[in-house]
Amino acid sequence: MNDIEQNSTERLIPNEYEKDNKISPNQIIQKTCCESICCCFFSQNNITISEYNSFQQLKKLTSIPYDDKNESHNKLLEKLREDSERIFKENQLNIDKNIWRTLGFQNYENPITDFRGSGVYSITLIDYLLNNYFAQIKDSFNQDFFSFAIVCIRVLYLLRLFLFLVDSINNISIEQMSNKVNPCNRKQIKSFCIILLKDNNIFLEIVSKMIIFVKQKYIKDKNNVKKELNLLIIDPIIYLSLTCIGDALNNYSNQSRDIMNLLNNEFAKQMNYNLNKQKLI
């Protein structure tokens, strides 16, 4: 039994297997690498049905591509525009005539194309940050080589890859990520599933804190990092923030239930880390 005990009322068999008793847990459908890995975590680390379902719901939610023919998607984008203009005005900050340029979208004429990496959930994330953490992010909008919206989308994508919250790995493989930071292990996935089941808003909080750390670390270190292409500047800091996520999940247990406190402690420890000392750059 793991350090966090499973609910004895739940059988460790995914819903997919229960739908067809001809399929056994050992006959995992090999649709994608990530599906196989996820089922492996599930079967070998005492993840309960409720935890598994919660994980899968988040995976589906963060995997929805933007569809410009979907009215609800367009309304989310319009809400982001309205919220952005209102918040900038309330805080008396100057904005470009094109709000998408101010927010840091690469394609500020049509930001829809920037959502390829993390889809509709990117809009939810950016809007959440603006409405809940504007005081912490407002200095993002006057930094050279720091495109806020693109950084948000990039952080979200790499965190989803780190946590195996993707349907397919596409062009960026787990092996490539492993050259920079180790993806989640079973213990970390188990901790994440427990936390997610307790609070389905925790993923937004985690990725928001990651983005704030990335911004703060960038401002602190910007004179020491290469100023070439945006992602070449930001990626090493994102990878560093992922190690903080992994360490916080490792330290999560029955005795320390506040994951955000653990995460803030990890970020504080790494704020002075010299990125040139490791393989992150």
Image (tube, rainbow, N blue to C red):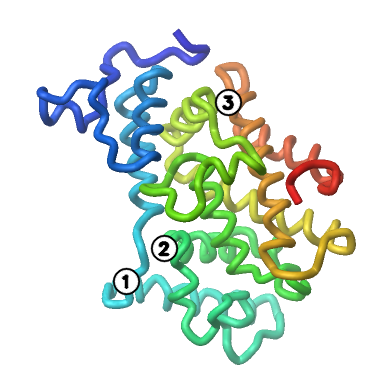
Q: On the picture, is 146 further left or further right than 51?
A: right
Read off the residue under disc 3.
Answer: 257
Q: Disc 2 and disc 3: Cα gap in Å? A: 31 Å
- What residue appears at the point 59 percent right and 55 percent down from the top-left corner? 155
User: For the N terminus, which image quadrant?
Assistant: top left
Against 89, residue 210 (above or below) is above
- What residue appears at the point 40 percent right and 18 percent down from the top-left corner? 44
The amino acid type, in three-letter code, at marker 1 is: Asp
Q: Are marks 1 and 2 in contact (CB under 8 Å)?
A: no
Residue toward you, 92 or 245: 245
Read off the residue under disc 1.
Answer: 67
- What residue appears at the point 56 percent right and 36 percent down from the top-left corner? 183
Earlier sequence position, callout 2 versus callout 3? 2
Residue toward you, 268 or 26: 26
Q: Residue 278 at x, y = what percent? A: 80, 41
Question: Comparing marks 1 and 3, which lies closer to the viewer?
Answer: 1
Q: Residue 144 at x, y = what percent? A: 78, 74
Q: Residue 124 at x, y = what percent? A: 46, 62
- What residue appears at the point 81 percent right and 45 percent down from the top-left corner? 271
Residue toward you, 150 or 133: 150
Read off the residue under disc 2.
Answer: 119
Q: Disc 1 and disc 2: Cα gap in Å? A: 9 Å
